[in-house]
Image: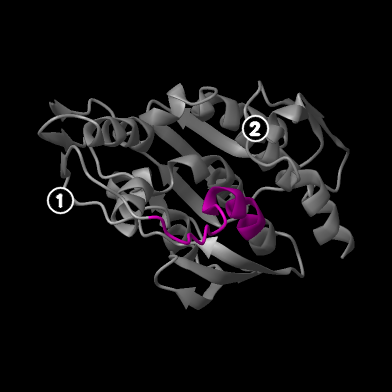
Amino acid sequence: IHYQLPVASAQVKSALIFAALQADGESVIIEKEKTRNHTEDMIQQFGGQLQVDGKEIRISGGQSFTAQEVVVPGDISSAAFWLVAGLVVPNSKIVLENVGINETRTGIIDVIKDMGGKITLSDIDQIAKSATITVETSELKGTEIGGDIIPRLIDELPIITLLATQAQGKTVIRDAEELKVKETDRIQVVADAMNAMGADIVPTEDGMIISGKTALHGAEINTFGDHRIGMMTAIAALLVQDGEVDLQRAEAINTSYPSFFSDLEGLIHG
């Protein structure tokens, strides 16, 4: 097959790559934008061959693979909630070990640095593409997020929105139309949830405009079945000093992080 992806989707790309490995001849897959490349890395680690030239991927079918010992780093999308908690909750320092730092996934680290966050990487494993990440409470400033960085942090944008509410000045998120077709319309749902808690967010066609720094207060928030909305709200609740946060349909968090609340309790109470 010779196929051009109509959307920037690592999931669709990976499905096509696996199908191409079982096909006769060579397949060419062209991405709309470069997305996370875990599948390409894994295939090569197992002895497979593919050629990547910019947004074009070429794969031949009928390849053989050799068993490997695989070290799986922690998911940076899940780590993102603790990164933000460590940056915005007063008197915090959080150390996260074995976090994946594949270059196609580290947009949130770049944004944190742009906003003036205190973040350091150590114990970097070049083969596993992992590191220990340390964050501390920081004075943050607004920034602009758009263009090529969006595929590298699309799943982290809800929690980055919370981060932006605690930064001085304006943060603009653009080129993120894909947020509308996630588990929910994350542009509208994130804006509604944060605004209900006292934030100042204006949703746009392709992102949000967030004005900070704003104090947050208690509210009733519904995840609408979206795990990332639930975890974002739980981290936001750590900043609430007026009222309580009533999180409806919190079970959605189990989709990606079943131990989230026990881990949160462990951080709060040591």
Amino acid type, callout 2: Thr
Q: Tell us which disc is closer to us: 2 or 1.
A: 1
Label pair 2/1, CB-CB below 8 angstroms: no
Q: Give the residue furthest to the bottom.
A: 123
Q: Position of residue 21 (x, y in %)?
A: 24, 36
Residue placed at 42% from the left, 59% from the top? 68
Q: Nearer the viewer, residue 25 or 237?
A: 25
- Identify residue for label 1: 51
- Identify residue for label 2: 255
The magenta segment: 67-84
Q: Earlier in the sequence, mark 2 or mark 1?
A: 1
Determine whether 168 is above or below 119 in the image.
Answer: above
Q: Position of residue 161 (x, y in %)?
A: 55, 44
Q: Nearer the viewer, residue 167 or 249?
A: 249
Graded by Cα atoms within 10 Å as few (under 14), some (14 to 19) or many (20 or more), the crowding at tag 2 reads few
Determine whether 237 is above or below 69 in the image.
Answer: above
Left/right of residue 180 with respect to residue 91 in the rendered view:
left
Q: CA distance from mark 2 to mark 1?
A: 34 Å
Q: Position of residue 126 (x, y in %)?
A: 40, 72
Amino acid type, callout 1: Gln
Look at the image and tell me whether residue 195 can be seen: no
Graded by Cα atoms within 10 Å as few (under 14), some (14 to 19) or many (20 or more), the crowding at tag 1 reads few
Residue placed at 72% from the left, 36% from the top? 197
Left/right of residue 121 with respect to residue 172 in the rendered view:
right
